[in-house]
Amino acid sequence: MPASTIRRRRYPSDTSVAEWTLIEQLLPLPACPSRTVGRPEEWHRRDIVDAIRYLVDNGVKWRALPADYPPWQTVYYHFAAWHRRGVIGFLRDQLRRQIRTDQGRCPWSVTLIVDSQSVKGAETVSKATRGFDAGKKINGRKRHIAVDTLGLPVMITVTPADTTDRDAASGQLTARRQEIKTRWRRLSAARQALLTLAHLRCGDTYAQLAAGFGIGIATVYRYIREAVDTLSTLAPSLAEAMRTIRTKAFVILDGTLLPIDRIAADTPYYSGKHTRHGTNVQVLTDPFGRLLWASPALPGSTHDLTAARQNGIIEALADAGLKCWADKAYQGAGGSVRVPFRRRRLRRWKRRHNTTHAKIRCVGERAMATLKGWRLRRKLRCSTRPSVQASILLLDNPSSVG
């Protein structure tokens, strides 16, 4: 670290102590940390960062930096070096992930919001980097930004104003693939997402998808497996979902049998109640019937109460002290789980109680209908993969991870 004294905070754009503590650990180490191995840096890195922030905040020229900052040549040298090494993008991504983690969100956002804005270009902007936006009648540049659901920037691109939003979004996806160092692909990111949705929603076979998209069957399998595994890692666990569930007035717990295509030898997956093969899935919904969380699939012969206990739902609701409405299958769950009375001949007040209970709980059937709309569930022959369940949950409720 240089021996110069750190300058006092004089401008609103200067970093605070807390901000610098967070940024300092993300910057690359100096090439020469001491004089014994070479010439160390003359200026403190906090001064460099403050100068860059001042320039961005005020939009001044490099040569117009105030005198109490390091020389503009030194500031520009560090900025260009960090830009070439990807340090600027690394800082943006790490800070965004930390903010999302602190707010109880998944570090990686699954939903992006893309927008653009055309701005007039100065006279010094070259012709090669400017264009005319015919829609807004602006001659200059267009800045494209992709943000997550919290409004945190994910990617920023500046293009000539005549560039369409579609082309810019494709360029951002391409840059994103290059950032994660993915291999060359036959399908774009949008086409891969469409391929996965066609398989999950419509239940199209690999052969049908291969013929429709003009790729091989092995490629279809690899693309779908990659997308499903990626979505499943982003899907919230029960503990993560409880952070959202605790903010609700009450929740609705229900179980359903998702029919699947299995042979008669698969006894554990045969439900005697429904007289067919299937998987038992437990669902938690909010008072309006919106899906909050779905459990991994269990064999169809599993009782609803047993499935809820195995997935830790009863214990989690009891620890949160949250009211829960459920049907007669959850008799004996205890805690805050409310169930209707079970008898044929009931007193009038008990019948009224059951009627009111049914009116509250029936809203949860909306989430059941949503889950059963995925046709892939009815074509699963092999052991049901938890990643498929998690990916479908995420596609049904993207806001669960932000």
Image (cartoon, helix red, strand yellow):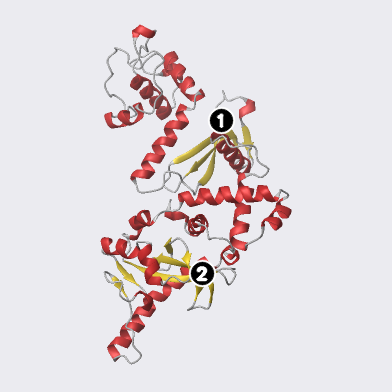
* Horizontal side, residue 201 vs residue 51: left or right: right
Toward which corner of the image does residue 262 lie, by quadrant?
A: bottom right
Q: Position of residue 71 (x, y in %)?
A: 40, 13
Seen from the viewer's position, the closer of residues 127 and 213 is: 213
Crowding at dot 1, Cα within 10 Å, few <14 / some 14-19 / many 20+, comes out as some
Q: Is residue 9 above or below residue 193?
A: above
Q: Amino acid at mark 1?
A: Gly
Q: Residue furthest front?
A: 265
Mark 1 or mark 2: which comes first in sequence?
A: 1
Name the element at disc 2: helix
Residue 140, visible in the rendered structure: no
Q: Amino acid at mark 2?
A: Tyr
Q: Is residue 338 above or below residue 174?
A: below
**Comparing labels 1 and 2, the label whose residue is closer to the camera:** 2
For the point 28% across and 65% down, which residue is it?
322
Q: Position of residue 156 (x, y in %)?
A: 51, 36
Q: Which residue is mark 2?
A: 269
Residue 327 marker: none
Q: Cβ–Cβ below 8 Å for labels 1 and 2? A: no
Q: Position of residue 361 (x, y in %)?
A: 39, 75
Name the element at disc 1: loop
Toward which corner of the image does residue 237 lie, by quadrant?
A: bottom left
Crowding at dot 2, Cα within 10 Å, few <14 / some 14-19 / many 20+, comes out as many
Q: Which residue is mark 1?
A: 121
Residue 186, visible in the rendered structure: yes
Q: Which quadrant: the N terminus? A: top left
Toward which corner of the image does residue 292 lie, by quadrant?
A: bottom left
Q: Is residue 348 above or below residue 83?
A: below
Q: Position of residue 52 (x, y in %)?
A: 41, 24
Seen from the viewer's position, the closer of residues 242 and 302 is: 302
For the point 48% across and 59% down, which residue is it?
393
Q: CA distance from mark 1 to mark 2?
A: 65 Å
